[in-house]
């Protein structure tokens, strides 16, 4: 083992060893640094003072020296075990500096005409790529062989290579093989490269560029190089203080690919492909990966169980999860990874409300698209384990389509009531759903729909308590569930030609606002306009404020409006809100006369699950006033409808 402090230029250019390459093995995670890390690295390097210090400390790099290297290119190869995020980011930064010099005519002229500037330029090149010099017809030329850094096999490395080659090709002295210069701008690698390019635009003087490169090259690392993989992994436990902590899924991937690599490179490649399919299905959030892997393990622990079979039905802990998957991978990692990837294809529709993705899902899932989307919006992710099992094992369990629909609806209803009341407690939910799954496994011939309903219903509060919650100040107590209720009511009462998506958001951003906003008919804001004081309390402001506080957040005082119409309605009088039109669009009604079911007659219940009956209610679009009694009447009507639609009564089954 060698452990020595070194600077970046020695790390990347090499000392006595000129032809070498760092590569990141497939079991390492993809590039994960974001703007916060890029910004800190830039600021720390740009502000370091190499004249008065030993240079900026970047942390530890742990590598394994391969005994055979790469005979095709005569290279020494070093497998990066720790430090891949920093090494990749440094390479992208150096590439951005090279690009900045090449694209800036003034800077490039200095490089072309000044010996010292040209030397710096070539040092940058040597830190980025491995190349040979050859005598051309007219002058000495450089043949680029490959980047100095090789990322994980697959898309990431191809993308990085294209980025390197397309940047270097702008220099006429560089010749290389044809490349695909089409960039996927969603890649984090490209985002980092563009970030550094933007920061470099502020450096227009060559002296500033030289100072930056000097600071980068003078930055220090502790370079630990071993030739024994076991020794490397003993040293490596987690990414160091400049890195991003590894998630459970990262550690499982590491372990899985290490074991797969011991079988053969082909096995490792297949396992990595299946793992990447899982990531493609589940998205970028580590918490989704970990939850899926927990749920998958709890579903199939009996097939791979080791040790004592008398396990309690509890969700496995993070540390245990890694150990269990490590045991699983010893036997048949390919078979296991293929099944995990298949399960993740179903699981993605339990966590993503992407309507386009749901519409294009597998044929067997398509009939459940509406129910699955409502389940996602009721925020019942703990129930994913049951729905994954039901959907994945539907044929073995002989479940019909209508039975699966019923189970999804039950779980959705359960979480609506649970989220409104807070009961059962959060720490009881994992055990409840694992117990239900285990019960189905123990007796798969039992009436599964009835069994699931019974287990869920008996854990809820009594019916009268549920109705009392619905009659309360629902909006102030749980805005998310109010939105779920209103969107669901509108959705199931849409006409055939109404294609409105009530779950739509303004953008794809994680915290994007919904296009439809919850509208208080009697305004919730302060001060309450005089017209509303007159409307609800005949001019008595003190009484009006008390009534506003008591009734404005009732479900009967709420509807949905499209943004930004909500701002247009605001504190207007009831009649102004009711009759508001879009003057820029042929006076289309955008107030309460917009034709939506919530603003119309609630009396006729169309859903096949309900008994058709008339309920005393108020039609917002037709009434000329909005009084407290009308809020009470509409609340009563909606409570009956909501309770009936989401009922968990045994009589409904």
Image (tube, rainbow, N blue to C red):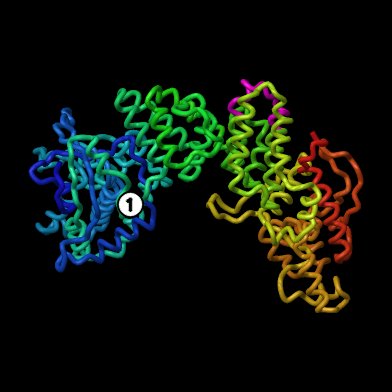
Is 451 placed left or right of 94 in the picture? right
Q: Residue drawn 77% across and 75% down?
A: 529
Is 200 placed left or right of 331 in the picture? left
Residue 392 on the magenta span: yes
Q: Position of residue 209 (x, y in %)?
A: 22, 61
Q: Quadrant of residue 161?
A: top left
Q: Position of residue 417 (x, y in %)?
A: 71, 48
Which image quarter is the N terminus in? top left
Q: Foreground: 201 or 475?
A: 475
Residue 112 on the magenta span: no
Q: Position of residue 19 (x, y in %)?
A: 13, 39
Q: Does residue 590 lie above or below 570 as drawn?
A: above
Q: Foreground: 49 or 248?
A: 248
Which image quarter is the C terminus in? top right
- The residue identified by callout 1 is 243
Q: Does residue 472 lie above or below 349 as drawn?
A: below
Q: Position of residue 637 (x, y in %)?
A: 85, 52
Residue 344 visible? The answer is no
Residue 492 visible? The answer is yes
Magenta part of the chain = 391-405
Q: Residue drawn 15% across and 55% down?
A: 120
Q: Secondary structure at mark 1?
A: loop
């Amino acid at each position: 083992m060698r452990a020595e402090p070194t600077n970046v230029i020695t790390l990347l250019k090499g000392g006595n060893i000129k032809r070498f390459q760092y590569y990141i093995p497939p079991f390492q995670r993809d590039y994960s640094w974001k703007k916060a890390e890029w910004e800190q690295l830039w600021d720390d390097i740009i502000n370091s003072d190499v004249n008065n210090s030993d240079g900026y400390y970047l942390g530890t790099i742990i590598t394994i020296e391969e005994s055979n290297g790469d005979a095709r290119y005569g290279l020494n190869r070093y497998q990066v075990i720790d430090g891949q995020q920093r090494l990749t980011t440094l390479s992208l930064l150096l590439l951005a500096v090279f690009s900045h010099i090449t694209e800036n005519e003034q800077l490039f002229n200095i490089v072309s005409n000044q010996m010292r500037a040209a030397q710096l330029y070539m040092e940058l090149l040597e830190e980025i790529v491995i190349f040979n010099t050859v005598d051309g017809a007219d002058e000495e030329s450089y043949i680029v062989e490959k980047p100095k850094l090789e990322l994980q096999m697959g898309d990431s490395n191809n993308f990085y290579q294209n980025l390197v080659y397309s940047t270097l090709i702008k220099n006429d002295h560089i010749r290389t093989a044809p490349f695909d210069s089409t960039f996927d701008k969603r890649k984090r690698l490209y985002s980092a490269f563009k970030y550094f390019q933007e920061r470099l635009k502020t450096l227009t003087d060559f002296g500033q560029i030289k100072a930056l490169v000097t600071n980068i090259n003078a930055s220090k690392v502790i370079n630990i190089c071993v030739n024994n993989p076991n020794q490397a992994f003993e040293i490596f436990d987690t990414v160091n203080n400049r890195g991003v902590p590894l998630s459970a899924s990262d550690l499982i991937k590491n372990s899985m690919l290490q074991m797969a690599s011991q079988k053969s490179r082909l096995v490792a490649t297949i396992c990595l492909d299946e793992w990447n399919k899982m990531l493609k299905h589940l998205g970028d959030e580590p918490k989704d990966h970990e939850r899926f892997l927990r749920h998958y393990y709890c579903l199939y622990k009996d097939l791979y169980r080791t040790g004592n079979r008398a396990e309690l039905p509890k969700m496995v802990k993070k540390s245990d999860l890694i150990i269990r998957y490590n045991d699983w991978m010893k036997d048949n990692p390919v078979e296991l990874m293929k099944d995990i990837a298949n399960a993740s294809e179903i699981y993605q529709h339990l966590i993503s409300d992407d309507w386009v993705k749901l519409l294009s899902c597998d044929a067997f899932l398509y009939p459940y698209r509406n129910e699955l989307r409502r389940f996602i919006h009721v925020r019942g992710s703990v129930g994913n384990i049951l729905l994954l099992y039901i959907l994945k094992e539907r044929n073995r369990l002989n479940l019909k389509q209508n039975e699966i629909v019923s189970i999804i609806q039950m779980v959705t209803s359960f979480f609506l009531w649970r989220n409104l009341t807070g009961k059962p407690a959060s720490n009881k939910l994992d055990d409840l759903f694992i117990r239900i799954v285990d019960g189905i496994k123990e007796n798969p011939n039992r009436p599964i729909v009835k069994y699931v309903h019974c287990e869920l219903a008996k854990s809820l509060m009594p019916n009268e308590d549920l109705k009392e919650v619905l009659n309360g100040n629902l909006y102030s107590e749980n805005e998310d569930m109010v939105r779920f209720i209103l969107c669901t009511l509108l959705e199931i009462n849409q006409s055939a030609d109404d294609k409105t998506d009530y779950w739509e958001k303004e953008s794809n951003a994680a915290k994007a606002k919904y296009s439809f906003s919850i509208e208080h008919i009697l305004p919730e804001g302060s001060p309450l306009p005089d017209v509303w004081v007159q409307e609800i309390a005949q001019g008595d402001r003190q009484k009006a404020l008390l009534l506003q506080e008591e009734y404005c957040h009732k479900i009967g005082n709420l509807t949905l409006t499209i943004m930004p119409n909500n701002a247009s309605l605001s504190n207007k009088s009831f009649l102004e809100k009711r009759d508001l039109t879009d003057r820029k669009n042929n006076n289309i009604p955008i107030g309460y006369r917009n034709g939506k079911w919530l603003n119309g007659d609630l009396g006729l219940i169309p859903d096949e699950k309900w008994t058709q009956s008339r309920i005393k209610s108020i039609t917002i679009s037709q009434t000329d006033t909005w009084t407290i009694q009308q809020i009470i009447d509409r609340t009563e009507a909606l409570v009956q409808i909501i309770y009936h639609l989401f009922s968990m009564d045994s009589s409904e089954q």
